[in-house]
């Protein structure tokens, strides 16, 4: 990898780390592997991230943002507004529930307590 400005180099390391973590898991990956595949040295990697854990958390944030963007895009065309769907009754999407059937407290993690 040619010399990149620090923000671009950091982004390249994150992209590579996300791929490596997805392929090998957190415990199955090493910072040496991530650095090597990013085309940087471990000291350079550690200039951008204090630890492997910090880099992993950044990757989780990237994955969440990508997934959220996909969900937002997927829901847009069928929406009647930002969060409503035309094929779902309003009562199902507005947080209300069918009042004719009481909730069973034993099924909601309360151990039978309301």
Image (cartoon, rainbow, N blue to C red):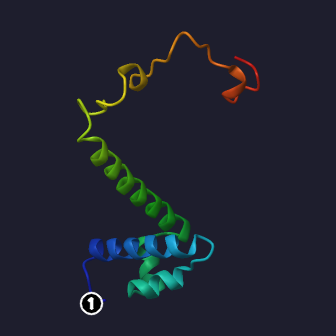
Q: Residue at 36%, 28% (x, y): give it.
A: 88
* Frontmost residue, 111 versus 49: 111
Q: Is 78 positioned to the left or the right of 54 in the image?
A: left
Q: In what element is the residue under mark 1? A: loop
Work out whether 53 lies above or below 71. Answer: below
In percent of width and height, residue 53 lies at 55, 66
Work out whether 95 lies above or below 29. Answer: above
* Frontmost residue, 45 versus 1: 1
Q: Is 95 positioned to the left or the right of 11 in the image?
A: right
Residue positioned most to the front: 87
Q: Is 34 positioned to the left or the right of 3 in the image?
A: right
All told, the count of numbered labels is 1
Q: Residue at 33%, 52% (x, y): give it.
A: 70
Residue positioned most to the top: 100
Q: Which residue is mark 1?
A: 2
- Quadrant of the drawing holding the C terminus: top right
- Quadrant of the drawing holding the N terminus: bottom left
Work out whether 114 lies above or below 93. Answer: above
Q: Residue at 39%, 83% (x, y): give it.
A: 38
In percent of width and height, residue 37 lies at 43, 86
In percent of width and height, residue 12 lies at 34, 76
Work out whether 60 lies above or below 74. Answer: below
Q: Residue 59 is drawn in which quadrant? A: bottom left
Q: Residue 95 is drawn in which quadrant? A: top left
In percent of width and height, residue 58 lies at 44, 62
Q: Residue at 55%, 9% (x, y): give it.
A: 100
Crowd around label 1: few <14 · some 14–19 · many ≥20 (10 Å): few
* Frontmost residue, 111 versus 46: 111
* Frontmost residue, 92 versus 39: 92
């Amino acid at each position: 990898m040619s010399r990149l400005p620090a923000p671009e180099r950091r982004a390249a390391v994150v992209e590579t780390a996300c791929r490596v973590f997805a392929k090998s898991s957190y415990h199955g990956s090493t910072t040496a592997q991530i650095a090597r595949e990013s085309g940087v040295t471990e000291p350079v990697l550690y200039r951008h991230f204090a630890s492997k854990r910090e880099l992993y958390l950044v990757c989780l944030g990237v994955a969440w943002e990508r997934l959220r963007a996909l969900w937002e895009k997927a829901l847009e065309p069928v929406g009647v507004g930002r969060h409503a769907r035309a094929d779902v009754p309003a009562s199902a999407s507005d947080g209300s529930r069918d009042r004719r059937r009481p909730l069973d407290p034993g099924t909601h993690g309360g151990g039978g307590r309301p």
